[in-house]
Image (cartoon, rainbow, N blue to C red):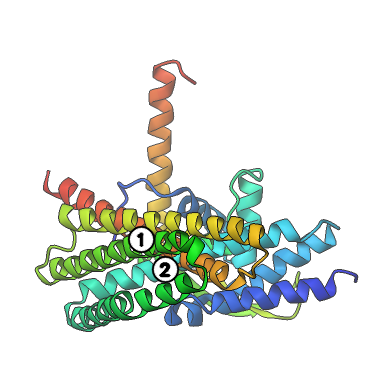
Amino acid sequence: MALEPRTRRYRNWYSKLLRLYPKAYRERFGEGMEQTFNDLCRERAQEGKGLFRLALWMFVETSAGIIRENATIIMRCIMNRGSTIFLRLVITLIAIAALAVCVFKLPRMIAQEAAKTPDTAWQIYLFLVGAYIQAALFLFALYQAFKLLSYADGNKAFSELSVRALRHIKHAAITIGLLMVAGVAWVMILSAGTGDDSAGPVMIGFIGTFASSVVAAVAVVLQTQVQKAIDTKKEGLS
Amino acid sequence: MSKNTPNTPLTPAVLHILLALSTEERHGYGIMKEVDADSQGKVKMGPGTLYGSIGRMIEAGLIRESDKKVDPEMDDERRVYYRITGIGQKTLAAELERYREVVAVARRKQLA
């Protein structure tokens, strides 16, 4: 069959994608999901239709499932009090690392870049401003995550306070993502003018955009789950 | 988390999986085909939604894993089959009753 190598490639990618599921889930359903994916591909091939759209749809659909299942795990971690200490430690370390980059690394890097092209140094400084806004939003989101954990410790995980913290995280992540997109667009326009190689910064921008989209998506899922739990509790009381 | 009590409306995915499993036990792909046929292609469910729902339904006791066996109509790979439980049947019946009531109300209001 002419489709065979491509089908095999899709299968390969799909089984790689499934690795992003939480371990317990993957061990339980991974094989079945892969079989189902293969069955659908085969059915499609037998009908003589193209695989690309089906495969793309299943990749997107499964990615949504991956975010949902991981969010559920995070939720359980939060509800399980013992593990919040570890999560707090991780958040604190990330915050310290981010602060260190902002204070020591960024200004030096920017100064070096600006020294290379003194005429257009203002563009570089504009980047610095953008980076600091993003860093501030990032630290704000971390602070909200920290607060979320303290709500969980105080048995207030399912409260309007948590919903508000999650909403803040969502907004921060979306804003960071948008700034990244704006930055990437700007770098591309600038480098188109000068002919510089901009692959590095553009790649970082894309990864950053992707990461902040994932964070925003997880926050949305958690927010709806917490809201649902609150609503169910209210119904139970009324 | 959210327990599926007979009074709460089911999500479309859960309802269709229960319907697909109400007549016989099926594997993942079999469930998808049945849901597709039941809904005349209107409900499209990918592996992510399907297995996510299956996981939650097993937790809620609506369905359970049956044997792992070869489907004679397909290749010789062994597949996990799923079957509906007593709670699942009751939940499905309660949901269908709820639909019947909704339709009855709509009829009374001459909407249907």
Of helix, strand and loop, which one carries label 2? helix
- Picture quadrant where residue A55 is located: bottom right
User: Which residue is painted at 50% across and 79% down in the image?
Assistant: A26
Q: Is residue A69 left or right of residue A30?
A: left
Q: What quarter of the picture does the C terminus of chain A occupy? A: top left
Counting from the top left corner in percent of width and height, residue B99 is at 42, 37
Q: Along the line of sight, which residue is nearer the eye, A207 or B106?
A: A207
Q: Along the line of sight, which residue is nearer the eye, A57 or A202?
A: A202
What chain letter is assigned to the residue under label 1?
A
Frontmost of labels 1 and 2 is 1
> Looking at the image, is A166 positioned above or below residue A111?
above
Of helix, strand and loop, which one carries label 1? helix
Residue A69 bears which disc, if any? 2
> Looking at the image, is A41 positioned above or below residue A108?
above
Residue type at mark 2: give it.
Glu
Q: What quarter of the picture does the N terminus of chain A occupy? A: bottom right
| Neighbour tally class for label 1: few under 14, some 14-19, many 20 plus, Cα within 10 Å | few
Q: Is residue A143 left or right of residue A27?
A: left
| Neighbour tally class for label 2: few under 14, some 14-19, many 20 plus, Cα within 10 Å | many
Residue A129 bears which disc, if any? 1
Q: Earlier in the sequence, mark 1 or mark 2?
A: 2
User: Which residue is painted at 43% across and 78% down in the image?
Assistant: A22
Counting from the top left corner in percent of width and height, residue A166 is at 27, 58
Q: Residue furthest front?
A: A119
Residue B73 visible to an observer of this rendering: yes
